[in-house]
Amino acid sequence: MSAGPRLPGIQNVIAVASGKGGVGKSTVAANLALSLKRLGQKVGLLDADIYGPSLPTLFGLKDKQPAVDPEKRKLLPLEKFGLKVMSIGFLMREMDAVIWRGPMVHKMLEQFIKDVDWGELDTLLIDLPPGTGDTQLSLSQLIPLSGAAIITTPQDLALADVVRGVAMFQKVGVPLLGVVENMSYFACPHCGEKSEIFSHGGGRKKAEELKVPFLGEIPLDPKTREGSDAGLPIVEGAPESPQSQLFLKTAQALLTELQSVQAGGEAVKIQL
């Protein structure tokens, strides 16, 4: 499937996806974006979940609206923690519900990509809605993606959808950069004992079965949840914490896989 032209000034566009909802994809995307910034990159983050935008809450930007460049007639992304960020949540009231059919979603996504002045970026992360629907298809048609990362949790219910996600990106010709296992375990903050609430290791096992890179595992952590609710992601609020170091390690693995693909590595191909 052919895509539209590359975005001027943006070196790489990476989709962050999940096969199902509830796996913490947006929290992971926000902390990966901040981790990439810590690794020296200029980073933008686009919240492409039209029906359930999370970025305004995650970055403490509720009730904020983007300005418009009068000369270029383009929206200017908001800036927070050194990132450029854009979301439909900046253009609607919190209580509004988006009730749109596929063509309207496509048009809005096209505006966010083409009518936003992102400037010079090393990486634009796009936080996709869960599943394999209109937004994913529209994105693959609008711009060439450098790659995609799939977020999952360890239990079988989530892992079954990883296969669909990998197959979707394969069909539209997007390189799979790898799988991240979120909510991998819970480490007690008092005694340090690990509890595998949603099982453990399923993401790595599924990645090995599909011959997809495994990028890392992120445990359940109350401070991560608290930071997300407070608009201060943990990578920014507690950059030296063990949780932040795991996000940083995962972001480095993501960059390594991206460099491998760009150096001529084979795109992931699976047999379903």
Image: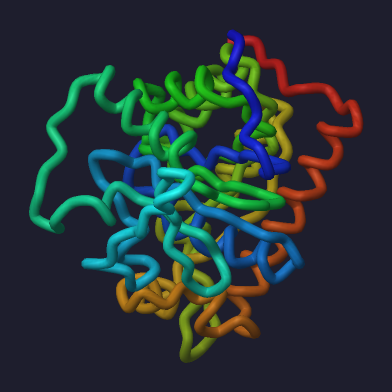
- Left or right, 31 with respect to 102, comes to right
Confirm whether residue 259 shows in the render: yes
Closer to us: 71 or 254:
71
- Residue 194, horizontal then vertical, whole percent: 53, 72
Q: Quadrant of the C terminus?
A: top right
Residue in the picture at 65% in, 43% down: 204
Residue in the picture at 28% in, 66% down: 64
- Residue 142, horizontal then vertical, whole percent: 51, 22
- Residue 49, horizontal then vertical, whole percent: 34, 41
Q: How is the image coloured?
A: rainbow
Q: Quadrant of the N terminus?
A: top right
Residue in the picture at 72% in, 61% down: 41
Image mark count: 0
Closer to us: 68 or 129:
68
Confirm whether residue 152 shows in the render: no
Q: Is residue 14 above or below residue 4?
A: below
Q: Residue furthest bottom?
A: 190
- Residue 113, horizontal then vertical, whole percent: 47, 36
- Left or right, 239 with respect to 41, comes to left
Q: Residue furthest right?
A: 263
- Left or right, 43 with respect to 81, comes to right
Residue in the picture at 84% in, 41% down: 259
Quadrant position of residue 78: bottom left
